[in-house]
Amino acid sequence: MEQLNLYQNNYLIVFVFLCLGVLLPIVALFAAKLLRPKYKDDERKYTTYESGMEPFSDARVQFNVRYYVFALMFVIFDVETAFLYPWAVAYEKLGIFALIEMLIFVVMLLIGLIYAWKKKVLKWI
């Protein structure tokens, strides 16, 4: 009988958190709707730019694809360096096996960097 009560209490806790997870955002959105300042609609608000200035050209400007590729390369290598930090902190505990794994990881990054360099992806313009 005690086992059954423990089992039911676990589901009760999950149900309470589920209800809180649903109710809190609803209450927060409703409170924000009540408390926000109310402005009357203005035609300028529905223009392309909300700054009040008249748009003078098309908002869609073409960019060279190299900028996107360069940004993606930066993000990839930036995220990969984030993987190096925890390894460096726990280096003494991990041992030689982790050192070999990290060397393989860094070599793979270098291969990717050399490939990008050969394809002239890193050339800005």
Image (cartoon, grey):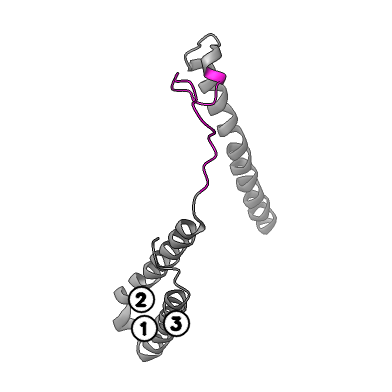
Q: Position of residue 55 (x, y in %)?
A: 50, 25
Q: Indicate which disc residue 111 carries.
A: 3
Classify the position of the C terminus by image quarter: bottom left
Q: Main SS type for the magenta part?
A: loop
Residue 76, position in %: x, y?
45, 66
Residue placed at 43% from the left, 78% from the top?
A: 109
Please state which amino acid type lies under the numbered disc 3.
Ile
Residue 54 belongs to the span the image colors magenta:
yes
Label pair 1/2, CB-CB below 8 angstroms: yes
Towards the viewer: 79 or 71: 71
To which residue does mark 1 refer?
94
Which portion, as a residue range, is magenta? Answer: 45-62
Marks 1 and 3, how far apart at CA: 25 Å
- Above or below — where is 3 with respect to 27? below
Q: Residues within 10 Å of mark 3 (few under 14, many from 20)?
A: few
Could you say where residue 26 lies in the image, as x and y percent from the top left? 60, 29
Q: Earlier in the sequence, mark 1 or mark 2?
A: 2
Instruction: Report helix, strand or loop for mark 1.
Output: helix
The local crowd at label 1, few if under 14, some if 14 to 19, many if 20 or more residues have their Cα within 10 Å, is: few
**9, above or below 34, in the image:** below
Type of amino acid at the residue the image marks with label 1: Leu
